[in-house]
Image (spheres, rainbow, N blue to C red):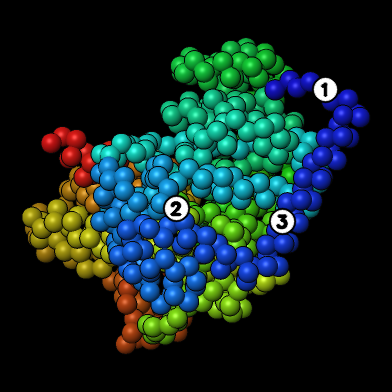
Amino acid sequence: MPEAPKCPQKAGEEESVVAAENKKVLEFIEDITMNADQVQPKVLAEILSRNANVEYLQRHGLGGHTDAQTFKKTMPVITYEDIQPDINRIANGDKSPILCSQPISEFLTSSGTSGGERKLMPTIEEELGRRSKLYSLLMPVMSQFVPGLEQGKGMYFLFIKYEAKTPGGLAARPVLTSYYKSSYFKNRQPDPYTNYTSPNEAILCPDSYQSMYAQMLCGLCQRHEVLRVGAVFASGFIRAIRFLEKHWKPLCNDIRTGTVNSQITEPSVREAVMRILRPDPKLADFVEGECKKERWQGIITRIWPNTKYVDVIVTGTMSQYIPTLDYYSNGLPLVCTMYASSECYFGVNLNPLCKPSEVSYTLIPTMAYFEFLPIHNDKEQQEELVDLTDVKLGQEYELVVTTYAGLYRYRVGDVLRVSGFKNKAPQFNFVCRKNVVLSIDSDKTDEVELQNAVKNAVTHLLPFDAHLTEYTSYADTTTIPGHYVLFWELTLKGSTPVHPSVFEDCCLAIEESLNSVYRQGRVADKSIGALEIKVVEEGTFDKLMDYAISLGASINQYKTPRCVKFAPIIELLNSRVVSSFFSPKCPKWIPGHKQWATMHMD
Ligand code: AMP
C-alpha cells in the first residue's frame, strides 16, 4: 500500500511511542508473573462471585463461596460430555443463567469433537477483550529479540470459516472467525504491529479461494515491506505457498496489468486489492522468474527478501511440517508465539526465537483460573489437582481451566510439561493432545474413531471373503495438502478378486465415518487430501513386530500401533505395499451440527 512517507522526526516520535508501549506490556508480564500466586485466587474469586447465582454452581452446592479450597472440594473436574446437556439447552435458546451470569454471545466451535461433532464452547462478549489482550503481548515480546519490526508489515494468511446458527439463534463459529469479525480486529487502531499486507476485506471474504488469491496478490505487491510472514498453524502457511505454486500465472498476470482476475468476484475484495495493485511488469517478471524455477527451496526469502521469521505454530502435531517450512524458508526462525483454544487463550512464548523443540508457553495468570492434573504413565492414579504456582519442574499435567465464560474445572485435553518458570509463573512445553493419533490440519482423530471408521469400511470386503488382519496409519505430510494413509494387511480367501473400486469405497467409507472437523477439512477448507489405503504383503505386520522387538519392545506386550510416526517403520511398511487406492470423492459435510440440520428439517 503506498503509504504517506514518514518525515524523520515523526518516525522518531512514532518509534518512541512504540518503545514506551512495549515497555508497559513487558512490565505487565513481569508484574503478573511475579504475582501469579496472588493473581490466580483473585481471578477465581472474581469468576465465582460474578456467577454465584448460575444454575450450574448452585446445582453443585457451591453456595456462593469464592475461595479455592471450597471450590476444589465442591466442584467436580469435568469433560465436555458432563456439561453437554447444559450446552444443548443454551444452543436451543434457553437464556437463563445456566453456566454464566452474563449473556452467552455466541458459541465457539472447537476442533475437538464429541460424538463426531465439534464441541460448542459458550462465550461472552468480554472474552474478546481478554483475547485481544493476549494478542497485544506478542509483539512487544518479539521486539526484544527482533528490532525494527514496526518499520514494515506482516504477511499473514488469515481466514474466516463457515459459521452456523444454533436452533436458539446464536452464531456457532471458530474462535478466529469470531475474532476477525469483531471490532477488535476490523476496527483496530493503526498500529505498526498489526499492519498486515492482507486487507481486512480479503481476510473476511468467506470464499477461501478468493480470500487466498487476494491475500497472496497483496503480499506479492508489497514484497519489500514484508518483515515477517505467517499463518496460525504451519499447515495453513504451507497451503499458501502451495497456492502460489499452483496459481502464480494469473497472479503475475494481474501484477503485470494492474487488474484483478475475473475469478475474484467479491466487489469489496476487488476494491481492496485495487487500492494496492499497480501495473508492475518488472515485479511480474521477477515473480514469474522465481516461480518458474524447478526448485522452490528458499522461495520465501527469494520473494520476500526482508523476512526475519516465519510466525506459525509448529508445536504439537504441527511439528511434522518443520522440514517443509525449513525448505521453503531456507531455515528462517520458526516462531511459535502463543498457545490458545476455543475454551480460553492460555499463554505466550517469552523466548520466541528458541528452537521449535524447545518452545515453552508461559500461561498468563489473568486469562483464567488454571489447575493441573498430574499425569502418571505407569498407572491411573487419583491425585489432587495442583495450582499454577505449585506445578513441579519436569512433571507432565493435563490442563484444567475455570473461565470467565462459565467453564468450571474443565479438562482441556492437552498434556503439558513444566519446562521452567518466569518469576512465579510456570512455563510449559506442549506435549500432546490426549488420544489424538492422526492430524493434518486442525482435525484431531483418536484411536477409537479410527477403529470405528475401519470397522465400517471393511464391510465392503465381506462379499469377497477378504478380511483385514492388521492395520496401522500415518499422517502423510509429504503431499500438499497432507492426507491420512492406512496400511492394510488382508487375508484373501475368496476366489473373486477384489476390484479396485471396492477399496476406493473402503477409503470413502472411512472418510464418511470420521468426525466433522476432518470432513470439513476435506470438503470446505481443502486442507486435507484424499484418504489412501495401501495394501501390504502378507506377513508385513509380523515384520513390523520383529522390528519393534529388535528395538526393545516386549514380545508379550507387543500391540500393533494404530498410528506410526517413526520414519524407519514407515519405510518398512512402504517397501511392502502391493497396491494403493484413494478416496474417489469427498465425504459429506454440512456446516453446523448434524442434529441441528435434522431439527431444521422437522
Ligand atoms: P480449538 O479448540 O479448535 O481452538 O483448538 C485448541 C487446541 O489446539 C488446543 O487445545 C491445543 O490442543 C491446540 N493448540 C493450540 N495452540 C497450540 C500451540 N501453540 N501448540 C500446540 N497445540 C496448540
Identified by mark 2, the residue type is Ala
- Secondary structure of the residue carrying tag 1 is loop
Label pair 2/1, CB-CB below 8 angstroms: no
Q: Is residue 57 visible?
A: yes
Q: Quadrant of residue 237?
A: top right
Q: Residue at x 43, y 57 (%)?
A: 51
Alpha carbon of mark 2 to alpha carbon of mark 1: how far? Answer: 44 Å
Q: Is mark 3 within 8 Å of ligand 1?
A: no
Alpha carbon of mark 3 to alpha carbon of mark 1: how far? Answer: 33 Å
- Per the image, the residue denoted by label 3 is 28
Question: What mark, if any, has residue 5 been given in the picture?
Answer: 1
The answer to whether 60 appears left or right of 464 in the picture is right
Identified by mark 1, the residue type is Pro
Q: Is mark 2 within 8 Å of ligand 1?
A: no
- Secondary structure of the residue carrying tag 3 is helix
Outermost residue, right direction? 9
Task: Decide which of tag 2 and tag 1 comes sooner along the chain.
Answer: 1
Q: Is mark 1 within 8 Å of ligand 1?
A: no
Q: Residue at x 61, y 78 (%)?
A: 393
